[in-house]
Image: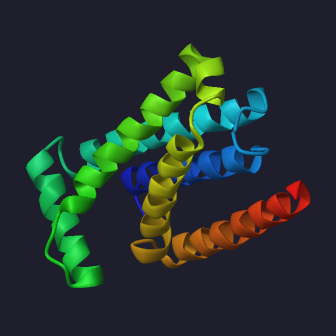
Amino acid sequence: MDGAEWAIRLTAFLAFAGYGLALACCRGRGCSTGPSGNGWWLLGLVAFLAHMVCAFHFEHGWSHAKALAATTAETVKVTGVDTGLGLYLNYAFALAWLADAAWWHLAKRSHENRPAWVGAALHCFMAFMWFNATVVFGSPWGQTAGWAAVIGLGGWFALQRGRAH
């Protein structure tokens, strides 16, 4: 594995770890428990943006067309479906995460008091994307990490929900 591949994988791992640790810091309905959750959220976001930069620089030569072709080819190989939609979903993922982090920093009280469905929609979309990135399209190590996160965070949230009632 060369330096470019290490950079792409390391930034992806740090993004996933930041996301998972931020969720683990959540209490109740929101993730507004203080600087640790917010710090992990930002670390994950910055790492994900760095991951996108590394992938576009090292893998695709800053070409959207090449990234779209590679995404389509990988999707066909893994799922049999001929689509590059995943690339656009990754763009939406980055924008959603960036918008949420900005909201959290610029209007913390508003972010804490947002309707529950907004947070649920965001986290369902993000969980869907992470599941696909790790379990569906990931390497064997990525798949293991993805399943561990699904089981670990799912169990943790179930315990938290049980304690709340």
* Residue 165 figure quarter: bottom right
Q: Position of residue 62 (x, y in %)?
A: 18, 40
Q: Quick check: can you spot residue 151?
A: yes
Please give the name of the residue rendered at 51% of the width and 37% of the height, measured from the top-left corner. Answer: 45
23 vs 133, nearest the viewer: 23
**Among all residues in the image, which is located at the extreme bottom?**
80
Left or right, residue 162 beside residue 40: right
Please give the name of the residue rendered at 66% of the width and 66% of the height, measured from the top-left corner. Answer: 149
Please give the name of the residue rendered at 78% of the width and 33% of the height, measured from the top-left corner. Answer: 33
Q: Position of residue 162 (x, y in %)?
A: 86, 64
Left or right, residue 136 beside residue 46: left
> In the figure, 165 relative to 34: above or below?
below
Q: Position of residue 133 (x, y in %)?
A: 43, 64
Color scheme of the displayed model = rainbow
Q: Quick check: can you spot residue 54?
A: no
**Among all residues in the image, which is located at the extreme top?**
106
Please give the name of the residue rendered at 83% of the width and 58% of the height, measured from the top-left corner. Answer: 160
